[in-house]
Image (cartoon, grey):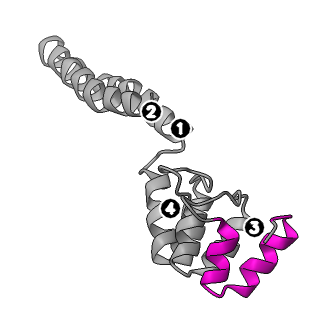
Amino acid sequence: METFSICCGIVLAPILILAWLAICSLAKPSKKVIVIGLVVICLPFAVAAIGMGKFMFLDEELRSACYDGDLPKVKRLIMFGANVNMNDDGVTPLCGATYNGHEEVSLYLLDHGAQPENCHDATLMDLAKNQNMRKLVQALKEKGIKE
């Protein structure tokens, strides 16, 4: 459904804008009316994008930042509304950060609502132990995750 919504926005918005500009070229309204019409056309798309939490594809950016261990970027993206529990075929940002050995990013995600789920064929606890992430192992134990 999300992909359908994005595609509709990508296709529908330019069609509506072009139709409005064609009408304006025939009717010759004032510049103020043209601008107001464009705002009325574009505003619902902008509000929908922000409401879905997908403005600038925040979730994909978060996943990438977690894999790379870019803590400042992770903090910014979460502040702007990226979903810390987005799940891409069984891989969450927390799984990606832990798998790649980024303990500080993993801890930050946990502190900001990330759910410690299993990652593909391994548990998050196993990944943390394999990466020798003592602080993360302790944080998972405190959240009730068993070894």
Distance from disc 1 to disc 2, alpha carbons, whole Å, reads: 9 Å
- Answer whether labels 3 and 2 touch (C-beta < 8 Å): no
- Determine whether, in the image, residue 5 is placed left or right of residue 116: left
Identify the magenta region. Answer: 123-145
Location of residue 2 (image quadrant)? top left
Q: Name the outermost residue toward the top.
A: 27
The local secondary structure at tag 2 comes to helix
Q: Residue at x 48, y 62 (%)?
A: 63
- Mark 4 Cα-neighbour bin, 10 Å: few <14, some 14–19, many ≥20: many
140 displayed left or right of 82 = right
Is 135 part of what is drawn in magenta? yes
Above or below for 130 versus 96: below
Q: Viewer-proximal residue, 36 or 132? A: 132
Structural distance between the alpha carbons of marks 3 and 2: 28 Å
Q: Residues within 10 Å of mark 2 (few under 14, many from 20)?
A: few
Q: Which residue is mark 1?
A: 52
Residue 76 makes an appearance in the image: no
SS type, badge 3: helix
Question: In the rendered image, which residue does mark 4 sit on?
Answer: 62
Of the two numbered discs 1 and 4 on the same chain, state the one appearing first in sequence: 1
Q: Quadrant of the N terminus?
A: top left
Q: Position of residue 6 (x, y in %)?
A: 37, 33
| Residue type (three-letter) at the residue carrying disc 4 | Leu
